[in-house]
Image (spheres, grey):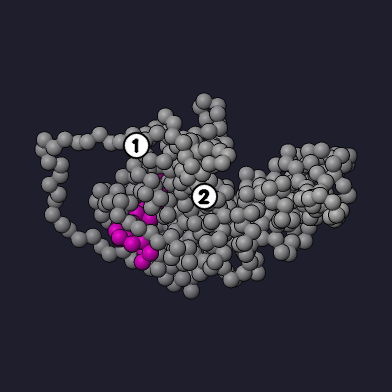
Amino acid sequence: MKFEQLREFRQQAYECLGNAKDATFELADAIMTTRHVSCLGDLALNPLFRREWSSVYEALQDCRPDRDQLMQLYIQQMSQVERPVLAIDHTAWLRPHAPTLKERTYEHQPTALPHGIPVGIGQGYSTIALIPTISGSWALPLRHERITSWDNPIGKGAEQLAQVCEYLQNRPIALFDSEYGCAPLVKATAAIAADKLMRIRSNRCLWSTPPAYSGRGRSKIHGNQFKLNDSSSWWEPEQTLESLEPKLGRIRLRTWDNLHFRGSPKHPMTLILVERLDTVTGQLKTQPLWLVWVGVQMPPLTEIWQLYLRRFAIEHWYRLAKQTLHWTIPKLSTPEQCERWSDLMPLLTWQLWLAQDLVREIRLPWQKPLPELTPGRVAQSMLPLLIRIGSPAVAPKSRGKSAGWSSGKLRAQRCRYPVVKKGKGRFQNSPKFVI
């Protein structure tokens, strides 16, 4: 049954690729089964790619993956759960030495760069992914799209959440990192049928519900100030709970209701403080974790902080895409080619998910057996399964040899584009161009 489900999924995905779908689908199979790639042309050496090396570049130039149809296809593969868990985050595809690539922006890069500044030049991509398991590294992206120079991660994430929720049958829970824990995201997602659980920075300030109108002057918008890094501004929590976890030890949880950001006073939230205490002394063992819940029905306090930890699966997917699926290897020349290449990453991940119970694990000599296969282990075991299941792509047809570049014809120098620096304040989404 799972074998037929994977075969049907591949056939339907093949129909969603538009032009050049034969070469594009064989390119996707080559990505999954090629371990080391130094450039895009190396994928043409894979035995599953039956065409010439030039068809690799032609596929990314001509294909038009239908993102909406692919997203609906992914949602059809989801198991019906009461409350789907979604994670939204963004990452950077750095291209510092590509001046001919349009719309490069300054992107945050948390890893250490040679110059010591955590900012690189490239393009940002926003991802919304389904987290299917309670633990593990599986994250199944539903949309993986470029953040344009006139957009920002918060606006793009809210747009993706609205697009996904339109096709979901049950109300999901969306998980966000601290960058998204702000008033603009709360207001942008207020009309979306989804609950939100987000982490906020420890230097933020929240406000309580204002007191009743006194009858004189303008009614107050904010109540008392709640500074996260100043315990003297806190009041008694609505709920306090302590538990003993097998791995983390003693955990103390506290909640405060009806708080809001300064910029979103009409959207009340529940603040959750998670503290890890020393078992003997009761002192703080690590930095506290501040969470905010915005939604209809909050899960039990003992579950909600563990629910947030599932968000880190999307970080594992970014590593899978960059290291195993070779997402950032090609040096493509246009943003459109980058987007078409990036559209293949969710398609490959869903195939790995559907094939995890069908593959026979092929381990490298230095790899240890695992209780459950990770996406990387499934990818390195996919070749025998793909040979067995076949490809919906049509075999290539022989054709005449191209005449090539005419002798004596001059080549025009490609245009150089400046890096886009996004403005702030009133014209936040209008780009400013700097060299």
Magenta-colored span? 14-36
**In the depicted view, which residue is nearer to us: 244 or 384?**
244
Element under label 2? strand
Q: Residue furthest bottom?
A: 1
Q: Is there CB contact under 8 Å for labels 1 and 2?
A: no
Circle 1 Cα neighbour tier, 10 Å, few/some/many (<14 / 14–19 / ≥20)? some
Position of residue 302 measured from the top left corner of the image (x, y, whole percent)? 78, 57
Element under label 1? loop
Residue 435 sits above or below residue 325 on the image: above
Can residue 318 be seen in the rendering of this structure?
no
Q: Residue 390: within the magenta?
A: no
Residue 120 sits above or below residue 151 on the image: above
Residue at figure coordinates x 34%, y 54% from the top left = 27
Residue that mark 1 sits on: 100
Residue 14 sits above or below residue 305 on the image: below
Q: Quadrant of the C terminus?
A: top left
Residue at figure coordinates x 25%, y 48% from the top left = 54
Is 274 on the left or on the right of 329, as rendered? right
Amino acid type, residue under disc 2 in the picture: Ser
Label disc, if present, on residue 126 of the rendered structure: 2
Position of residue 160 measured from the top left corner of the image (x, y, whole percent)? 53, 57
